[in-house]
Image (cartoon, helix red, strand yellow):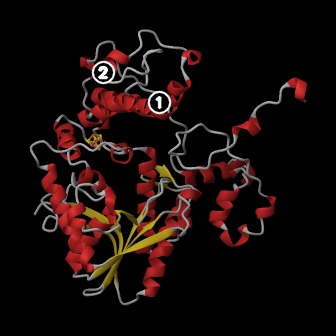
Amino acid sequence: MAGPMRHSLIGASGAKRWLTCPASVPETQKLIDAGWEGSTSPAAERGTAVHEIGEMCVLQGRDPQSFAGEYVNDILVDQDMVAGAEAYVAEVEALRAAHPEMEVKIEEELDLSFDIGEGAFGTADIALVEPFSTGYLRDYKNGRTLVEASIPAESLIHDQDILGGRTSVANPQLAYYGLGLASRYSLDSIDAGIIQPNAPHDEGLVRSYFIDEQELITWAMVFQAGVARTKAKRPIFHPTEDNCHFCPVKGNCPGRNRKREADLQGMFQPIGEEKSASISVRKKMPTKTPSAKELTPRQLAQIVTEGPKMITYIQDLISYAEEFAIKMGRVNEMPGMKVIKGRKGSRQWVSPSDAIARMKRLGMSEDQIFGKKILSPTQVQKTSPDRYCDLEDIITQPDGKLKLVPESAKGDAVDVEMFKPIPENEQ
Ligand code: SF4
């Protein structure tokens, strides 16, 4: 059998998306057919590099700190990346110490075509396995967006019948890897966890969820039903912030566009026509752009609520236009456009170790070569957590700025009367 492709359209990291928005699979396939080759970001590349450092440390016994100042995948390894790799290695060591009889698997490639469907495969970061027992699975996340090991079952909107009244279930990505591991190594159940050093969580860097045998069986049914939905003649779109954020088709998605139109209903409704309900968005667009002072309080509230979606929409369109022009090579079809080289990137040493040696030969001092910069309290908490409590009395943290948000947003409402300026005659 041919080796797995790098990304599966019904893969683990996008599982929540394709389970709830089945149309995202055929829509992504259309993009690929049109020449799209996938995209990445600096944050994703840093995360991949930290995974690789963690993997090398576990397999070769290297200290994460030994990578500081080196380049991994053309990325200069800084202390944040080292701290991430340390969290990765520490968790492997803790699991290994607690379960010395188990076999450790790092970056284990899993084929789930039998359990889920053709084209289902993925790579589990860290696993400890022993047939007919509970396996241990850990997924490293380098990002700052908090990821939980479990999710509310009600968020799997199409699978309520299969889930049979459960209130919470495993994070679908963990469930996906867990299913693959259980199938390959005859595991009874999975202790599935997330390692996330860059997003504070009440439970610390690692949190886990226990997937019992019955839930593993349930997940196989959920995934298979999900695959079937992606193959429907008219698969359902389910645009949510969560689903669309990393979806490759978000810049040109009919389902998302329809939802956006519905969300934007009334946002640019001309002044004085607020009460006329069911007119189309097109008719509601203003003939002139109103100034902020011309808007009513209700319209201002709508701008604050819906405006960010519009900004995201425009950014998505620009991203798609860039992909269309550059990655698909179709700039010539875009009137009045050309592709140029942006500003050069920042200068970097070809080899940091050679550069250090040369600067020393040139008589430069350690200070001139390395400089000295005090670590921030957050960095000290990461590098020396045991010393941090002795420093807390010399740390200051300004209050957050007042922010206008929709009522549904997190956070307690503040009494704005306190912040009103005092009239001069009352001072
Ligand atoms: S952009 Fe959103 S709605 Fe459209 S296919 Fe992707 S996830 Fe679904």
Image spot of residue 45 (x, y percent):
42, 50
Q: Secondary structure at mark 1?
A: helix
Q: Secondary structure at mark 2?
A: loop
Along the viewing direction, whichever of 52 and 162 lies nearer the viewer: 162
Q: Among all residues in the image, which is located at the extreme top?
A: 287
At label 2, the amino acid type is Ser
Query: Taking 338 as reference, is 105 above or below it?
Result: below
Query: Taking 178 as reference, is 287 above or below it?
Result: above
Q: Is residue 365 visible?
A: no
What residue did someone put label 1 on? 307
Position of 187 with respect to 127 (left or right) is left
Q: Is residue 150 visible?
A: yes
Quadrant housing residue 415: top right
At label 1, the amino acid type is Gly
Which label's residue is closer to the chain start, 2 or 1?
Answer: 2
- Other-residue count near label 1 (Cα within 10 Å), few / some / many at <14 / 14–19 / ≥20: some
Task: Name the quadrant of the N terminus.
Answer: bottom left
Q: Residue at x 20, y 63 (%)?
A: 161
Query: Taking 368 as reference, is 215 above or below it?
Result: below
Q: Among all residues in the image, which is located at the extreme bottom?
A: 101
Position of 101 with respect to 324 (left or right) is right
